[in-house]
Amino acid sequence: MSYEVIMQNVVHIAGLSGDPGSMSHLAHLPMLARMAMTPDGKSILFAIGNGGIQRLDVDTRANVPRITEITGKEGKRCTRQTPERAVCGDRKLSGEEIKDLDFVPYTPAAAASSQPSGASRAAPGSKALMVILDNGSAVAVDVDKGGSVLCRVQLATKNSHEDRRELKDDKVLLISSDDRLLLHHLPPGKWCERHWYCGSLLAAGMDRVLFTRVKCREAAAASGGEGRPALACLMNNRNGCHLAMWELGDDGLLSMRTACKAADAPGACMDVSTDGSLVAVGTSEGDVVLLGCRPHLRVVKRFPRAHMVFTTIVTFNKDATYVLSSSLDASVTVNSTALPPPPDFKKFLVLAFLLIAILLMCLLQVVKVLKQRGMSTEEILALLTRRPKEEL
């Protein structure tokens, strides 16, 4: 659905309600950056500027849908009204704009401990929201608690603490919550041997990496219904784009499980297949990279120069047999995700036997011609091995 269609529908809904409060929220909609549908399909979240998120409830039991603030500029705002209480508080994520967002199932540690051992980790309806900000940091938000921040992930190069302490290290990510602070060391890269002539070696690791896009791989698709859902995050730095798999634990903290470099150019867009086995990444140079997640994260196929300019959209079809990509020049490319068949070793063996047979036939023919010219076996061996006749 295009942005214009979304705007028309939202304006129509607000106009039907006749509520000035609903119409007042439309002032933020021209800054709409992203949208996401809740897992139950009852609400739509709109990411607006200045770290704000608005929720449009679609399934309201024949009532007029309303737009509700989840986060925003105001310091105090009622985010959810229930007969028991109203959840209020400071809901401003950041002064940065929201770049991307997606839902991930989440069960708090208290609720997870009360569940039986055979039950699913994520209770029905429990969910968190992974938000990517324009400054390259990530924020996990608990939607069921009125948008409270679970944790933040950002580089250790910015002063983000109240005590004004700075840890300047571009190879460390800070994972912080209200009561905990963890340091995640980014995986080192390999030394680039192509630049040995410049007098210094260049590292191609994940230093100074920034979040760009996020997609959730469900638990049922990630590992056959077992384990946690994984967050596929596209991360960029000066060395190119990387794909990292993150998980949201029961304690509300994010953790990186694995990572893989996708391309040398910055990544622009990303999509995950329905079964979670493939990830497609579009770059700023028009390339499309296909990565496999099973049994480990790796690049399985590349489509270089799929477009002449910046790739804007990349998506899979239902069964992930094709990947569609679009670019700024309004061109669309469809590529097959089928991998080339493995090499047939029987063919190589047949070719090797044929080559050996031809060489033997040539050698026997040479020996036959030499004997016809009167050379003995010792002389032929001496000729072939270039050794004196007396040594034989």
Image (tube, grey):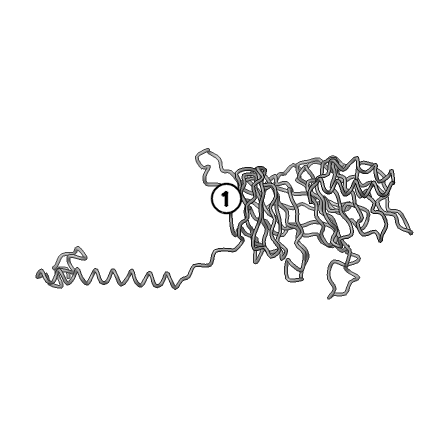
Residue 328: tell me if it is visible.
yes
Q: Nearer the viewer, residue 185 or 242?
A: 242
144 relative to 172, above or below:
below
Q: Name which residue lies at 46% across and 33% down.
A: 198
Please state the horizontal and vertical placement of residue 117, each as a whole percent of the image: 74, 65
Residue annotated with mark 1? 304
Please state the horizontal and vertical placement of residue 31, each as a whole percent of the image: 73, 36
Rendering quarter of residue 217: bottom right
| Total numbered badges shown on the rendered structure | 1
Please state the horizontal and vertical placement of residue 174, each as a whole percent of the image: 68, 43
- Which secondary structure, mark 1? loop
Quarter of the figure that contains the C terminus? bottom left
48 relative to 383, above or below:
above
Quarter of the figure that contains the N terminus? top right
Please state the horizontal and vertical placement of residue 126, each as a whole percent of the image: 77, 55
Q: Nearer the viewer, residue 203 or 301?
A: 301
Q: Name which residue lies at 53% across and 43% down.
A: 287
Left or right: where does residue 87 sit relative to residue 209? right
Amino acid beneath label 1: Pro
Left or right: where does residue 121 sit relative to residue 19? left
Q: Nearer the viewer, residue 49 or 132?
A: 49
Rendering quarter of residue 219: bottom right
Q: Residues within 10 Å of mark 1 (few under 14, many from 20)?
A: few
Residue 266: tell me if it is visible.
no
35 relative to 106, above or below:
above
Q: Nearer the viewer, residue 150 or 363?
A: 363
